[in-house]
Structure formats: structure tokens, C-alpha cells
Image (cartoon, rainbow, N blue to C red):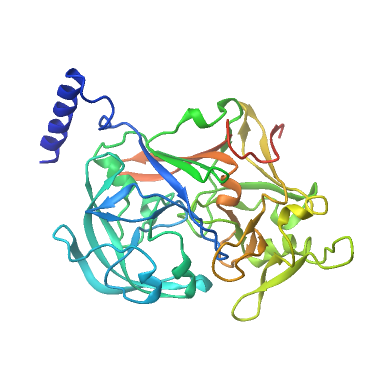
Amino acid sequence: MKTHLKSSIQYIVAVCIGAGVLTSAVPAIGNPLKLRLKLGPMADYGATPWYSEAVIFDNNKLKFALDTGANFTWVTSDLCTTSACQAHSRIDTTSSTFTWVDRSLQYHSFGPWGAMVTKTGKAPAKIADAEAIDIQLFASKFYKGAKFQTLAWDGGIGFPSESSEVAKGSGFPFLDLLTNKIVANPVVSFYTDRPSKSGEVVLGGDNPVHYDASRAAKLTPTKTRVKYLWGTELHRFEIGGQSLPPLAGKTFFLDTGSSHFKGDRDYIKPILDKFVNLKDAIGNPVFSRTLDGQGNWIGLYYTDGPAHSYDNLLPDVTVVIGQKCGGQNGVVAVTLRPDQYSYLIEQGDRSGKWALAFQILDGVGGLLVGSTFMDLVYTTFSYKSDAGTLSQDVMKIYPKKRGEQPKTFECLNS
């Protein structure tokens, strides 16, 4: 049936092109799929504000994060009636195309972030302009924690680095696209630009119009105890040109479901210590401490004013990673200005305040970052494909041709 459907689509496309009716409405089988990203409001909880509406279940227009920091796929469902769920669009589990796979309840903890309770279902989804495929996912019945209410998206599609690490019961949509030969190449690419509030994800390839290939930086894999994360070696982390020893040689994760830098206390506290006692020209503290629900210090927010008003006072931050850059053995040093490692809180707790994009989150096993860093570069995630399984191959970051740039993107000899 699937082969017949593909043949029918190819025949219709060929006839329409021959008649001069259609040029690119339906992508050729195996070609990359391009999904537009939109920028939602930033809240102070560490999740990315970027989402896509290019994944359609029936007529449900849902906002999905395309998340390299998750090993499962989930969505808010109509089973949930709490205020946190009603703040989101929800999948219709009464639809004739939705089927239950497992009605037993599963509890998914996100530590201090919150938790959700789900059942497991399956429904056909149309991704961009490709033919629909069945996707198995967790349908959320309950959210615990206020952060879900202001989440910019209604669900998340996981792109774990290892297919063997996919959570039991969840599907892996990108593997399904490859298995069904809807896309051919095991590569996922991300482009985002905060000023224009626009972005793009390419499933099965990349888009050279957005990046400078001459300075590509190759990031080879490094694994820690969280094996589904996309990790590489962090050679150095510098503040104001000075390296922080606790971070040298640790693992650096690129997580498209995240916004700011996060990591274990041993790694983030040395960063916060560099900022916490800074004072402005008249002796007022620049930062106030952010505490969690147990009173533990986890971050910093600006006591007064926007981040850019302190550009002359605050140091730059530099991440040094990679094994090749610009075609040569070496590393890449990406430097962020103070306004680039800070963000305006647009909704939820401390709305209207600015915060530093560094927060303690124990259990990461290294230093993790999302849009704070990735909005400034073009990123590709490549898999090794073998007998129906996927495993992490190299990541690459490139300087962008247009849009917001880091302060510097430098290839250095190792």
C-alpha cells in the first residue's frame, strides 16, 4: 500500500510538471524537508522559545519543539483539562485516525522543571509537504509544575543522538522518515535568527544559503551518562579571556530544546561566581540571585535595566570546541557579547527583567546550551545509519551568512 501510494504521488507530480501546473508543491521522494521555525516569548525556565507548526495531526495546528535534547516525542492531549493544558493546543484523541497503543499511565519527571503523566497513542502526521506517516507518541494527561503553562510549544519531537536510547513507548519520527525513504540523508540542520524571529530546520540535509562553508567547525562525538544527548569535548570555557579550569575537557552539549547554558553545580557555579559581586559605576549590585523552590542559588538576573546597558562593564564569554575548523586541524573559538549571553524574560516569573543565560541544573554531566549559543551559528547533526539504527556522528557549526552573529567565530590552531 505504501509503495503504491508513493508511485501514485510520483506519477501525479510527473503529469502536473509536464502540464506546467506544478513545479515544487510536492517534494520528490528522498529530498530534504524544510520546516519553518517561529520565535515564541521567552520565559525564565530554560526551554527554547523556538517552535514549528509544520507537523500536522488531522486538522490540529500544533506547535512542536524540534528537540535534540529529548529521547521521546510527546504532545498535549484533550485528556488534560488543567489550566496548564488549556493554555495549549491539544491533539484530538477522539479522532478516527488516532489509536491508543497503551492506555496505562506513565510518569515523566523533568526534575525541578516539572513532570507530566501520559498515555501512549499513535496518529498519522504530515511533516511539511511529505506524505503522512504514523507517529507513536506520549499524549499528556497531566502537567505538574507552573512552567508548562507558559511553555511556547504544545509538544516536542525528539531527535536523540542514539536510536537505542529512545524512551520505551515513544516513536522516533526522523528514523521513520528515513526508513520510509521520505528523506534520504541522516542529517538534521538548524538555522535561527532572533532579530527576524524566523528560522528553519532541514530534515535530511542542510541549506547552504544560510552558512559559510569555508569556516565549518567539526565536532566529534563525546558520550556521558546521558547517552541520548549530542556531546563533544569542551576544550576551554573563557570569561574575559581567562579559562575556567573546572570546565576544561568536560563535555559540551548542543540541545535545541533548551535556551540558555545549563549544567551541574560544579560547572555553573564557577561561572556565576565571576558575575555575582559586580557593581555598577555608583556601587549598586548589577545582579541579584535566582533561587529555586528550596532556596538554592541557581542563577542570576539583572537587578536593574537591560543587559546592553552593562556592555562596557561585563566580560565576553568564549566557548572553544571542535577538532577541525576551516578544513584544518584545530579548534573554533566562539565569543559572545554580554547582551548575547543574557535574555529578556517576556512572560512568567520576573517578566520584564533581564537574566544571565547560565543556570545550575544537576545531572547534566557537562555544560549544555541551546538557543543562546545556537541562534548565532548554523548547526548540523549527523547520524551514522546502520541496519535500521541511528547513532551520533559528527556535529558541525558554521558562521552564518546573514542574521545575528557571535562577536567572533575564529578558527585557531590546536
Which residue corresponds to the image point at 32% horizontal and 33% vertical from the top-left? 184
Q: Residue at x 30, y 64 (%)?
A: 90
**For residue 277, side relative to residue 296 (left or right):** right
The picture quadrant where one finds residue 92 is bottom left
Q: Position of residue 151 (x, y in %)?
A: 46, 64
Vertical relation: 165 (above or below) 328: below
Instruction: Please state the horizontal and vertical placement of residue 55, each as a whole percent of the image.
Output: 31, 49
Quadrant (top left/top right/bottom left/bottom right) for the N terminus: top left
Compared with 401, 70 (above or below) is: below
**In the rendered image, which quarter is residue 178 located in?**
top left
Residue at the right extreme?
282
Q: Is residue 31 above or below residue 223?
A: above
Location of the C terminus (image quadrant): top right
Coordinates of residue 301 in the picture (x, y in percent): 69, 65
Q: Could you tell me residue 36's position as x and y percent?
A: 41, 42
Does residue 169 appear anywhere in the picture?
Answer: no
